[in-house]
Amino acid sequence: MNIHENVCKACDGTGLLMDDEQWKYSCSVCGGDGILEAGESPEPDGPFDVDETNRTLE
């Protein structure tokens, strides 16, 4: 299996997403590790805590 097949396509394997103001956030698709394993759900485990501008809180 090619290692590039497991790379999260949402964050390109970095584990971070960036908004239009250049703020970086942990990737909500892969959980921040940059890898989607076979059988791993891309859905979050639970609801996120967000601020008034809908940014995830850590």
Image (tube, rainbow, N blue to C red):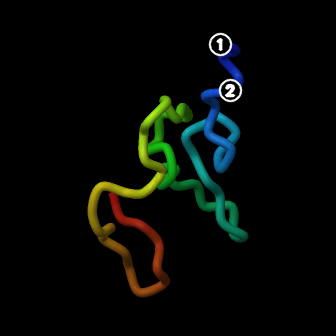
Residue that label 2 marks:
5
Query: In the picture shown, does residue 20 fall above or below 8?
Result: below
- The quadrant of the picture occupied by the N terminus is top right
The amino acid type, in three-letter code, at marker 1 is Met
Nearest the camera: 51 or 11?
A: 11
Q: Residue 26 at x, y = what percent? A: 48, 50
- The quadrant of the picture occupied by the C terminus is bottom left
Q: For residue 40, which quarter of the picture? A: top left
Query: In the picture shown, does residue 42 fall above or below 50?
Result: above
Cβ atoms under marks 2 and 1 closer than 8 Å: yes
- Residue 32 is left or right of residue 2, and the answer is left
Total numbered labels: 2
Nearest the camera: 34 or 23?
A: 34
Residue that label 1 marks:
1
- Residue 58 is left or right of residue 21, and the answer is left
User: Considering the numbered disc 1 on the image, is that residue within a helix, a strand or a loop?
Assistant: loop
Query: In the picture shown, does residue 58 fall above or below 56?
Result: above
Q: Residue 8 at x, y = what percent? A: 62, 39
- Determine the residue positioned at 65% across, 57% down: 18
- Determine the residue positioned at 30% across, 70% down: 49
The amino acid type, in three-letter code, at marker 2 is Glu
